[in-house]
Image (cartoon, helix red, strand yellow):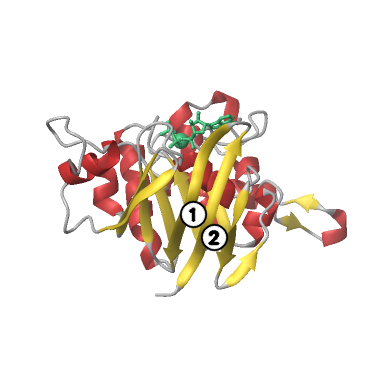
Amino acid sequence: MADLIRMVGITKYYGRVRALEDVDFSVREQEIVGLLGDNGAGKSTLIKVLSGAVPVTSGEIWVRGEKAEIRSTTDAIRYGIETIYQDSALVTQLSIARNLFLGREPVKGPRWLGRMDLAAMNEVASGLLRKVGIEKRIPPETPIAALSGGERQAVAIARAMHFDSDLIVLDEPTNNLGVAETQGVLNFVRGARASGHSCIFIAHNIHHVFQVVDRIVVMRRGRVVADDIDPKASSVEAVEQVITGMTAEGVPVGE
Ligand SMILES: Nc1ncnc2c1ncn2[C@@H]1O[C@H](COP(=O)(O)OP(=O)(O)OP(=O)(O)O)[C@@H](O)[C@H]1O
Ligand SMILES: [Mg+2]
């Protein structure tokens, strides 16, 4: 499969802190990539650069073989990149249904009247909530402020599912989730390939990553230290060593 996304020589400084150093990272079409690394390794920064949330210091991003200028999340969405952040961006005063359609609301009647089709939004929202594993019957009119952290994350995931982005980026989507919701997310990531999507999946739970991804990329201190680990041909322990740079005995790898 061809490359959907190619990031080349990405370096990012936050003031004097170097968060990324000369990172090359790519995702092929219909590929699920697991991005692993310890706290502060640079995972979130890399995907924030890709999704236009933070400006890059230097480096290039290519989408489907064309150089892309991604300066905002709106730019990223135009390139088909939808990101669900660790601290997901939802408008807490608005309902679940309104958040799902934010900026892309279906209209009812003549377009110039600009009347939102609330009934249609509510119906789609109900179906999506069930799909992401929220079994509890939460009315789609419920404001986000009344939801738990996990439920909020599920709403953000539902949004990416509905709008059919080419690349869905999930930054620790299972962090605050219960068992049913976690299974919902893992099933969604598994199903992403079959429905023609690519996915970047960041999680600290390596077992979850092993269950769903095609390829594992490991970052350490702002650099990519492995970019072609096949979860079917590798063990969790071996990947843990790559993440920490230490053997199980606490000896630096390669010494
Ligand atoms: N807004 C910021 N300002 C300054 N430094 C930052 C900022 N965001 C991140 N950093 C620094 O950049 C480095 C990489 O952080 P990043 O959030 O990308 O790591 P991460 O791999 O996502 O970690 P975690 O697993 O804890 O989420 C860290 O040293 C962090 O302290
Ligand atoms: Mg992070």
Cα distance between the residues tagged 2 and 1: 6 Å
Closest to the observer: 23 or 135?
Answer: 23
Q: Could you tell me the amino acid type at mark 2?
A: Ser
Q: Mark 1 and mark 2 in contact (Cβ < 8 Å)?
A: yes
Q: Could you tell me the amino acid type at mark 1?
A: Ile
Instruction: Name the residue tied to disc 2.
Output: 165
- The C terminus - image quarter: top left
Residue 147: image location, x then y, percent: 51, 27
Closest to the observer: 211 or 46?
Answer: 46
Residue 107: image location, x then y, percent: 74, 56
Closest to the observer: 168 or 59?
Answer: 59
Q: Residues within 10 Å of mark 2 (few under 14, many from 20)?
A: many
Toward which corner of the image does residue 204 lie, by quadrant? top left
Q: Is mark 2 within 8 Å of ligand 2?
A: no
Please name the residue shown 68% across and 56% down the image.
75
Closest to the observer: 117 or 34?
Answer: 34
Please name the residue shown 59% across and 25% down the image.
145
Residue 252: image location, x then y, percent: 21, 36
In the image as oriented, which residue stretches furthest toward the front? Answer: 255
